[in-house]
Image: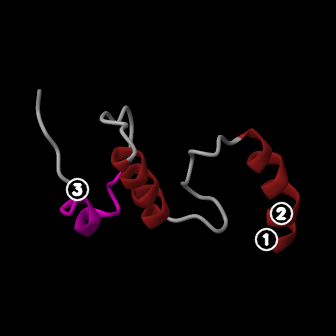
Amino acid sequence: MMAAVLVLDPIFEADLQPEQYAYRRGRSALDAVRHVHKLMNTGHGEIVDADLADTLILFRTLSFSSR
C-alpha cells in the first residue's frame, strides 16, 4: 500500500489546484476553512464552492448574509 502512495501521490498532486484541500497530505478541512475565512477577511465576499460537510462545528462559526 505504501509503495502505491509513494508512486501515485506525486502524479495526482501535480494535477491538483492549490485551492483543493481534500485527500491531500498535510492539508485538512480546518485548513480549507481557514483559507475561506482569510479570503472573506480580505474582501472576497462570495464563496463559489466549499465542501464543509465534515466541519459542522466550524461551519457554525461562519456568518453568512443573504442577498
Q: What residue type is labelled 2?
A: Ala
Quadrant of residue 53 within the rendered picture? bottom left
On the picture, is 1 further left or further right than 21?
Answer: right
Magenta stretch: dominant SS?
loop
Q: Which amino acid does label 1 sit on?
A: Met
Asked if marks 1 and 2 touch (Cβ < 8 Å), the reply is: yes
x then y, percent, for residue 2: 81, 73
- Which stretch is magenta? 52-61
Spatial CA distance of label 2 from label 3 is 38 Å
For the point 83% across and 54% down, the residue is 10
Q: Which residue lies furthest to the left in this view?
A: 66
For the point 39% across and 58% down, the residue is 33
Spatial CA distance of label 1 from label 2 is 5 Å
Looking at the image, what colour scheme do you see?
Answer: secondary structure
Q: Name the residue under label 3.
A: 62
Mark 3 neighbour class, 10 Å CA radius: few under 14, some 14 to 19, many 20 or more: few
Of residue 16 and residue 41, the one placed in the foreground of this image is 41
Q: Mark 2 points at which residue?
A: 4
Q: Does the magenta stretch include residue 14?
A: no
Q: Which residue lies furthest to the top in this view?
A: 67
Q: What residue type is labelled 3?
A: Leu
x then y, percent, for residue 50: 38, 44
Mark 1 neighbour class, 10 Å CA radius: few under 14, some 14 to 19, many 20 or more: few
Q: Is mark 3 on a helix, strand or loop?
A: loop
Looking at marks 3 and 1 on the same chain, the residue that comes earlier in the sequence is marked by 1
Q: Is mark 1 on a helix, strand or loop?
A: loop
Asked if marks 2 and 3 touch (Cβ < 8 Å), the reply is: no
